[in-house]
Image (cartoon, rainbow, N blue to C red):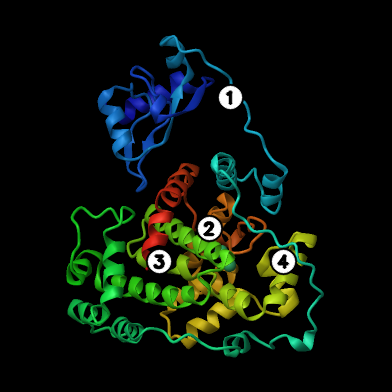
Amino acid sequence: MSGAVFAAIFKEYFLIGGCMETIRVGDLQNGMVLAEDVHDMYGRRLLTAGCVINEKNLEILKTWGISDVCVTVESKIALGIQHTEKKNEPVSGESLELFSLVDRNDPLIREIWQQSISIRSKRPYDRFLKNTKEVAPPQRNSLPANPAAIIEMGEFTALPEVYNHILSVINDERSSAIDISDAVTKDPSFTSRLLNLANSSFYALKNSVDTVSKAVSIIGTRQLGTLALGISISRSFFKRGENDASLTEFWRHSIATAIAARTLAIFLKEKNTERYFIGGLLHDIGKLLLYTRLHDAVYYIDTICRSHSLTQFTAERSILGFSHSDIGRELCLKLNMPENLLAMITDHHSVAESLRPFEATIIHFADIIVNGIKKGSSGELYVPPLQEAAREYLSLKPAAIDAVVRQVETHSEEITEIMLHD
Ligand SMILES: [Fe+2]
Ligand SMILES: [Fe+2]
């Protein structure tokens, strides 16, 4: 009998009306029976429902970093392990408020909610910084007339020389692996940051990469170019406020969204995943300009979000007449950024209006997950609602969310260290 047939029969005869329980892999015992298939982060099935746990299976689960599996309650009882009904985790008012704009009956949102409760209950403290400052509404005529005016306000940090070299290489269809290596290696500190990223546990390459040309051959010319572009932009913007706790939280949110977006792209079988990483990294870059250039207006927007239960995107549009996405778009145009990055930055709150709805959806959903588990903060008070236009691109099982969250939790600090610190 094939494994698949056995699994089907197992499900039909043993699980209908039966009980299952989620259990930590560390608590698994030989003889327990899996109630559901177990997949790795790429969606490949590692073990099938009905499989009896033994030492070999345990090793597989640990090797692939699986944290929880579903087992049949019957198999626990057969081993003499007492079954205790799982009590609902305590739900705080803050969690209810955080998820107040979304439908918790939606299977994808429900999974994010469960992950959020579980992860946030283990955190020693919540790093979200609350605004307690009272600010009067800004005078309409004191506000910039359009997003381009925000870009023009104040000084603009010069991007490193390497940025323009990389940009011209990735914008040129005829460019080769040698061209991108030459462009990147012009800046030694930048080169080592890029190699550290390629060698990080997040990238999980089989062999270590010690030269840019090797990194190009593994990651690809354009993909590496996109990574390089994103690193140089985030580096120059990070310097502007590295001692400000809110900005550190902002970058923590951005890096978490980058990790979530790349992982989602892998789950959705996308091939060129680095653009999602950089799209996630830079998706809220318009907020950074708002924070640093319109301080009081940002405080007022925050007050309005709180008092009227609005997302920042909606409040910004009603108060300023444009949003951080529009500011991000202006910045992309000014920096000649590639179109796919422009779409992810511009449309992550308006998928239906996007010419590249799939790319915009990945960033939109990654942002929802990261806001749900409150990894860092870009100032958003609520988990943004999942847009209808995004649904058709999200052929994900709720279990995929678990893998995305695991990637974010495991790799965020390492990637932050590589990307931002000297
Ligand atoms: Fe945003
Ligand atoms: Fe965001």
Residue that mark 4 sits on: 302
Classify residue 390 as left or right of residue 190: right
Q: Which of marks 4 and 3 is in front?
A: 3
Mark earlier in primary sequence (1, 4): 1
Residue that mark 3 sits on: 421
Classify residue 275 as left or right of residue 251: left
Residue that mark 1 sits on: 86
**Real-space CA distance between mark 4 and mark 3, rounded to the nearest whole angstrom:** 29 Å
Q: What type is the residue that disc 1 sits on? A: Lys
Disc 1 and disc 3 in contact, CB within 8 angstroms: no
Q: What type is the residue that disc 3 sits on? A: His
**Real-space CA distance between mark 1 and mark 2, rounded to the nearest whole angstrom:** 29 Å
Residue that mark 2 sits on: 365
**Viewer-nearest residue: 400 or 144:** 144
Q: Residue at x 54, y 42 (%)?
A: 119
Q: Which corner quadrant of the figure contains ligand 2?
A: bottom right
Q: Which of marks 1 and 4 is in front?
A: 4
